[in-house]
Image: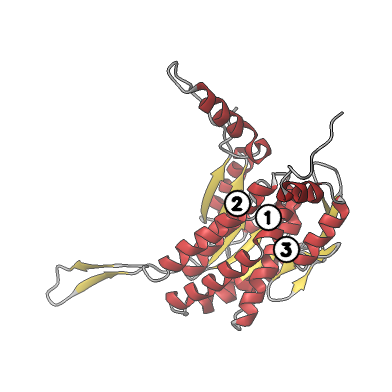
């Protein structure tokens, strides 16, 4: 047994200890409230919130605590939402790219304003540590910064023609509707990477996050929906359909989804690619894997040990670059 000399123990460390030992239920309720969430939430957004599918409860993987419930999309709602996203894309492509970038800038600021509670929700729902949860939200912010700059540099080309008095123009056009199926291990960042770039390029986005991180999907979409509403834009530009494998299959097989971005296991990614290819669609795949670590005889062992440890247990060991 020993006593802590509080006079010698910095205040910030005492505060951190107090925060870390606070009631898990209170931490959850405060986090949900800060993000506009409740114990029960609708999991479909296409300009309006809805949900007529199964109700799924998400839990804290570290404690088993039920964090909240989300009503998932029915097959009919997925179909309707894809249609609304396609309509929104036809309008959005007519908006000048710099103005699209301005909307993404506002989204970036809105996400940054909620970085602490959003990062905490990621930690609670996915299981990674708080610092990584906040860091993941920061990745969304960083990519949005890049996307805003990109909105003013979507350059084409002027090419010489064989015909006198003529020139050829190369112009990049929006794809249309981009579907995003993201994995549980990065429930904010992966969507942010896909969404920010897709939006400035003139596309609408329809998102299906992992069922185990449905609260995070709803929280992010609520933030973006407020920005769209403030700018009198169609909510279906950032559509959400919470659901399981059947929802993903519906997105993969629907011709109105012009490009489907999938992040997840190699096994499921292969199935997604085949489903999209069957309709001659486009797919973007970021699949699973493991990293090897090679330590040479002349390496700094202390540095190598720290690097290997973080590579193995970072993100709770759940990332495609995890050291085996």
Q: Position of residue 265 (x, y in %)?
A: 62, 40
Circles 2 and 3: CB distance less than 8 Å? no
Query: Contact (CB < 8 A) between labels 1 and 2?
Result: yes
Who is closer to the viewer here, 77 or 221?
A: 221
Count the marks.
3
Label drawn at residue 119:
1
How far is the residue under mark 1 from the one under mark 2?
Answer: 7 Å
Q: Which residue is mark 2?
A: 135
Q: Nearer the viewer, mark 1 or mark 3?
A: 1
Q: Is residue 306 above or below residue 115?
A: above
Q: Earlier in the sequence, mark 1 or mark 3?
A: 1
* Protein image colouring: secondary structure
Which residue is at the front of the view, 240 or 310? 310
Mark 2 surroundings within 10 Å by alpha-carbon count, few (fewer than 14), some (14 through 19), many (20 or more): some
Q: Quadrant of the C terminus?
A: top right
Q: Residues within 10 Å of mark 3 (few under 14, many from 20)?
A: many
Q: Position of residue 217 (x, y in %)?
A: 70, 59
Which disc, if any, is residue 218?
A: 3
Q: Is residue 297 visible?
A: yes
The residue sitting at 82% across, 55% down in the picture is: 27
Q: Nearer the viewer, mark 2 or mark 3?
A: 2
Disc 2 and disc 3: Cα gap in Å? 19 Å
């Amino acid at each position: 047994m020993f006593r802590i000399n509080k006079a010698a123990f910095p205040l910030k460390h005492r505060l951190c200890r107090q925060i870390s030992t606070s009631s898990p239920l209170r931490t959850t309720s405060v986090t949900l409230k800060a993000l506009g969430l409740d114990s029960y939430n609708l999991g479909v957004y296409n300009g309006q919130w809805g949900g007529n599918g199964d109700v799924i409860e998400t839990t804290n993987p570290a404690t088993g605590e039920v964090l909240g419930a989300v009503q998932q999309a029915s097959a009919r709602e997925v179909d309707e939402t894809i249609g609304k996203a396609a309509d929104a894309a036809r309008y959005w492509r007519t908006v000048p790219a710099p103005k699209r970038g301005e909307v993404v800038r506002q989204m970036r600021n809105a996400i940054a304003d909620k970085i602490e509670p959003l990062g905490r929700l990621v930690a609670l729902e996915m299981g990674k540590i708080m610092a990584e949860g906040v860091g993941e939200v920061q990745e969304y912010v960083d990519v949005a910064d890049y996307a805003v700059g990109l909105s003013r540099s979507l350059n084409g080309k002027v090419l010489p023609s064989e015909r006198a008095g003529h020139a050829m123009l190369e112009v990049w056009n929006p794809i249309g509707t981009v579907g995003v199926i993201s994995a549980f291990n990065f429930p904010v960042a992966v969507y942010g990477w896909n969404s920010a770039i897709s939006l400035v390029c003139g596309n609408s986005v329809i998102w299906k996050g992992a069922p185990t991180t449905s609260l995070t999907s709803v929280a992010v979409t609520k933030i973006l929906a407020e920005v769209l509403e403030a700018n009198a834009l169609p909510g279906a530009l950032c559509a959400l359909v919470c659901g399981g494998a059947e929802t993903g299959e519906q997105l993969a097989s629907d011709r109105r989804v012009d490009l489907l971005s999938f992040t997840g296991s190699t096994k499921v990614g292969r199935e997604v690619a085949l489903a999209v290819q069957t309709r001659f669609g486009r797919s973007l795949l970021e699949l699973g894997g493991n990293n090897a670590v090679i330590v040479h005889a002349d390496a700094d062992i202390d540095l190598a040990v720290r690097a290997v440890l973080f590579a193995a247990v970072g993100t709770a060991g759940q990332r495609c670059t995890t050291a085996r």
